[in-house]
Image (tube, rainbow, N blue to C red):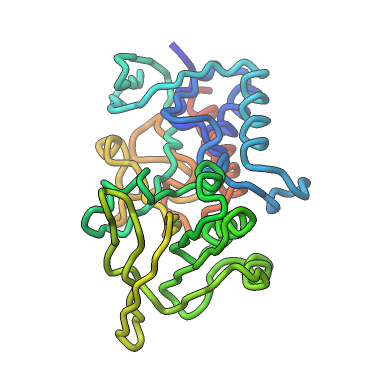
Amino acid sequence: MYDILIVGGGPAGLTAAIYGLRAGKTVLVIEKNGFGGQIAYSPKVENIPGTQLISGSEFADKLTEQAMALGAEVELENVIRVEAEGEIKKVYTEEGGCYEGKTLILAVGVKHRMLGLPGEEDLVGKGISFCAVCDGAFYAGQETIMIGGGNSALQEALLLSEVCSKVTVVQNLAFFTGEKKLSDALTAKDNVEAIFSSVVDEYLQENGQLTGMVIRNTETGEKRRLTCDGAFLAVGLVPENEAFAEAVQLDERGYFDVDEFCVTKTPGVFVAGDCRRKFIRQVTTAAGDGAVAAMAACRYLD
């Protein structure tokens, strides 16, 4: 029996663990993939106060080590169901685990959004990727396409430009939505081409491997065929909250419909991070949520 069960080992979940442990509570963090969450895949992180530059993986490691040094217990399992009614909260995992706690913090994060085009799922890992840190080296000296124009897309495209012969960035808007510093650095690259006001209509493939795509200009309707060796998607994120809908209300987009107090309709259940309804989703706001949720859980326990 733990004082606080935390589902999710990203910045929100691990920060919640740190605050809970510092308040003298026992904490278990359950994470299904790898501790650190999405930030672990960022090659460069420059927006954490007090840290000029750090890789996402290093930041994730430091955060995990800090929580564990304070006494956090961790499990690498996939949570599929929770029972949150009553004083004891129960968390069930795909691996057969069942964990009990007096309070529950859901910090389950988000997953990569896809375009929803025919054959897309089958091409993941066969030309379609999401993480340049993980897969960029496979395309060294080759041509790649980056779909998206936000901070994540620009960061990934910059990384790809260091190893690929050419990077084409396809953005559905007439401008990049990422930070100006990133867009300026990217457009200064000789091997980068930016195509604006365009969307992907179709994936091209041969023998089950991505070979290119057909894009369409949203202003003129003109279509264009692009060839590539690989493509990376950075078109946003979607929450993974369905398994917890009985315990926490969801909004129309599937996010936990909870404000910055991180308190849910179910006593003893709290949420934190990118999985909840919010305007800004950044590592700093996720960590802030973790602190708020943990302190709310501690008040509930006390």
Which residue shows up at 62% across the image and 19% down it? Answer: 68
Between 2 and 184, the one lying in front of the other is 184
Vertical side of 167 occupied by 69: above or below? above
Q: Nearer the viewer, residue 9 or 112?
A: 112
Residue 285 shown left or right of residue 249 in the figure: right
In the picture, the quarter occupied by the N terminus is top left
Front in this rendered view, residue 40 or 266: 40
Image quarter of residue 103: top left
Q: Is residue 51 left or right of residue 170?
A: right
Q: Is residue 160 above or below residue 71?
A: below
What is the residue that sits farthest to the left in this orientation? 118
Q: Position of residue 208 (x, y in %)?
A: 26, 48
Residue at the far top: name it: 1
| Residue occupying the point 39% across, 69% down | 226
Residue shown at 33%/88% (left/top)? 220
* Nearer-the-camera pick, 185 or 111: 185
Which residue is located at x 59 percent, y 42 percent? 287
Q: Position of residue 130 (x, y in %)?
A: 44, 49
Q: Is residue 2 above or below residue 35?
A: above
Q: Position of residue 116 (x, y in %)?
A: 26, 58
Picture layout, residue 60 above or below residue 229: above
Residue 224 in the image: state x and y as whole percent.
35, 77
Q: Left or right: 178 with respect to 206?
A: right
Number of numbered discs on residues: 0
